[in-house]
Image (cartoon, helix red, strand yellow):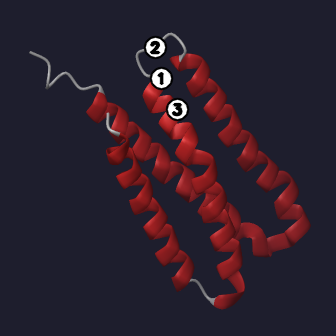
Amino acid sequence: MSLGRYLTGVTIVAAGSAVLTALVPGPDRAFVGWGAFVGLVLQAPLGWLAVRSIGTERFMAVWGLGMLVRLTTVAVAGLIVLPVLGSRSWPMLGTMVGVLVALLLVEGAAALREHTWEDQP
């Protein structure tokens, strides 16, 4: 798979996140922006590593470690950041989870496209 296809998907999600952040009312905009930023910075490299490891012996380790990192980040945000910042941090958590899910879909689409048997002779 070319890096270009994966980056195109990541760019689309990043652009959607930027539009969403711009549309949110002022007081919550910073929280939504941080959620999008954390989701993008976390998921983009993890997704690329997972897609590149498909078909190798290390795939399960890479995929499992990536899922553990994602779930730990969401847990830390939900159990530590949310109580500290209060109800104003819900937009951050929601945006972060939304970006993570959107980029997991990009990862799946990229993996499917890369490892389909349609191009095989």
Q: Position of residue 18 (x, y in %)?
A: 51, 73
Answer few, some or many: residues within 10 Å of disc 1's Cα (few below 14, many 20 plus, some between 14 and 19).
some
Quadrant of residue 110 within the rendered picture: top left
Q: Are marks 2 and 1 in contact (CB under 8 Å)?
A: yes
Image coordinates of residue 119 in percent, x first then y, are 14, 25
Q: Residues within 10 Å of mark 2 (few under 14, many from 20)?
A: few
Per the rendering, the mark at residue 53 is: 1
Which residue corresponds to mark 2?
Answer: 56
Task: Look at the numbered disc 1 and give the secondary structure of its residue.
Answer: helix
Q: Amino acid at mark 2?
A: Thr
Question: Which amino acid does the dot numbered 3 rest on?
Answer: Leu
**Quadrant of the snapshot with the C terminus:** top left
Residue placed furthest toward the top:
57
Report helix, strand or loop for mark 2.
loop
Q: Residue furthest front?
A: 3
Q: Say if 31 sits above or below 118 in the image.
A: below
Q: Quadrant of the N terminus?
A: top left
Q: Amino acid at mark 1?
A: Ser
